[in-house]
C-alpha cells in the first residue's frame, strides 16, 4: 500500500473514493474533491470514465478499504455505531450495485459490507492498519466475510427482522452512516503511486496477453474473410464454366 503520510480533508468517503480515480488529473481531482455533494462527486467521475487512472481495477478495493478504515477509526461517533453491531452480518442493500452492494436479488458481492465487517474486527481488536500491495491480497483477507446472499434475498422480509443481519442503504433508514454517501468530513491519506506501483505492473502483465489474443483474433478474422472470398470466387468460376458449357 502506498499512501502519503499527510492527509487531506474530504466531505465524505464518496468524495475521497471518486477523487482517487483521477490522482494524476489535478483539475478533475480538485473538482470532485470540492464538489458540493457525494452524489455529485459520483456523477462527475461517471462522466469522465475514460480518464480514470490505468491501475484503478487493481487498487479500487484498497482505496475503499482506506476510506472506510479512516472514516470509522477517526470518528468516535461512527466507530461506536460500527462496534455496536458486534458480530452482525452487514449488507449494503443496494439494488443497483453488484460489486460493493448485494444487488436487487442478492447476486452482488457486497464488498462494502465485507470491508465494514473487516474494519470492525480491526478496530475491536485494536489492530494496526494492515499493508496490502494490491486488491488480490485484500480480497483474501475479506474471504471470512463472504456469503451467498441469494438465499437471504429469496426471503428478504424475514431477514430484515433477523437480529443477526443489518441491511443499510436508504438515507431514511438506520445505518445510513455506513454508506459512502453519508456526508461527514474526514481526513484520509491519498493513494498517490501510479506508474511505479506494483498495481501498474500488473496492468502491463495482464494487458500483454490480452493484446496478443486480440491481434490473433484480428488476423484470424482477416484470414477467414480471405478464405471465404476465395471459396466464393472458385464457386463463381465453376458456375460460370458450367453455364458456358451448357
Image (cartoon, helix red, strand yellow):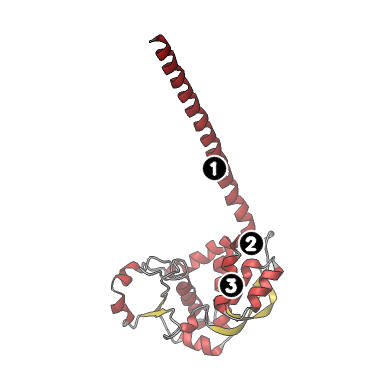
Q: Distance between the residues labelled 3 and 1?
A: 33 Å
Q: Nearer the viewer, mark 2 or mark 3?
A: 2
Say which residue label 2 marks. 51
Q: Where is residue 110 in the image (x, y as percent from the top left)?
A: 44, 70
Q: Which residue is drawn at 57% across and 85% down?
A: 184
Tell me if I can see residue 186 in this picture.
yes
User: Residue 17's quadrant in the figure?
Assistant: bottom right
Say which residue label 3 marks. 17
What element does badge 2 sit on? helix
Say which residue label 1 marks. 213
Q: How far apart are marks 2 and 3 (CA)?
A: 15 Å
Classify mark 2: residues with Cα within 10 Å, few (<14), some (14-19) or many (20+).
Answer: few
Compare marks 2 and 1 and give the one earlier in the sequence: 2
Q: In the depicted view, which residue is nearer to us: 64 or 2?
A: 64
- Where is the C terminus found, in terms of image quarters? top left
Q: Which of marks 2 and 1 is in front?
A: 2
User: Residue 90's quadrant in the figure?
Assistant: bottom left
Amino acid at each position: 500500500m502506498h499512501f502519503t503520510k499527510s492527509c487531506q480533508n474530504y466531505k465524505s468517503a464518496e468524495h475521497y473514493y471518486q477523487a482517487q480515480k483521477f490522482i494524476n488529473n489535478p483539475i478533475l481531482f480538485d473538482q470532485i474533491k470540492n464538489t458540493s455533494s457525494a452524489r455529485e462527486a459520483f456523477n462527475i467521475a461517471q462522466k469522465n470514465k475514460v480518464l480514470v487512472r490505468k491501475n484503478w481495477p487493481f487498487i479500487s478495493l484498497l482505496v475503499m478499504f482506506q476510506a472506510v478504515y479512516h472514516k470509522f477509526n477517526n470518528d468516535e461517533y461512527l466507530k461506536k455505531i460500527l462496534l455496536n453491531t458486534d458480530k452482525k452480518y452487514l449488507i449494503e442493500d443496494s439494488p443497483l450495485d453488484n460489486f460493493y452492494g448485494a444487488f436487487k436479488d442478492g447476486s452482488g458481492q457486497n464488498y462494502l459490507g465485507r470491508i465494514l465487517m473487516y474494519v470492525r474486527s480491526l478496530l475491536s481488536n485494536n489492530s494496526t492498519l494492515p499493508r496490502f500491495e494490491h486488491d488480490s491480497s485484500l480480497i483474501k483477507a475479506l474471504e471470512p466475510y463472504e456469503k451467498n446472499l441469494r438465499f437471504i434475498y429469496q426471503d428478504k422480509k424475514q431477514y430484515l427482522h433477523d437480529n443477526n443481519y443489518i441491511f443499510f442503504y436508504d438515507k431514511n433508514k438506520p445505518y445510513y452512516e455506513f454508506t459512502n454517501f453519508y456526508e461527514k468530513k474526514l481526513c484520509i491519506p491519498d493513494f498517490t503511486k501510479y506508474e511505479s506501483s506494483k498495481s501498474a505492473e500488473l496492468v502491463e502483465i495482464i494487458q500483454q496477453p490480452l493484446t496478443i489474443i486480440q491481434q490473433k483474433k484480428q488476423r484470424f478474422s482477416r484470414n477467414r474473410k480471405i478464405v471465404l472470398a476465395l471459396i466464393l470466387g472458385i464457386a463463381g468460376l465453376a458456375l460460370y464454366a458450367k453455364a458456358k458449357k451448357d
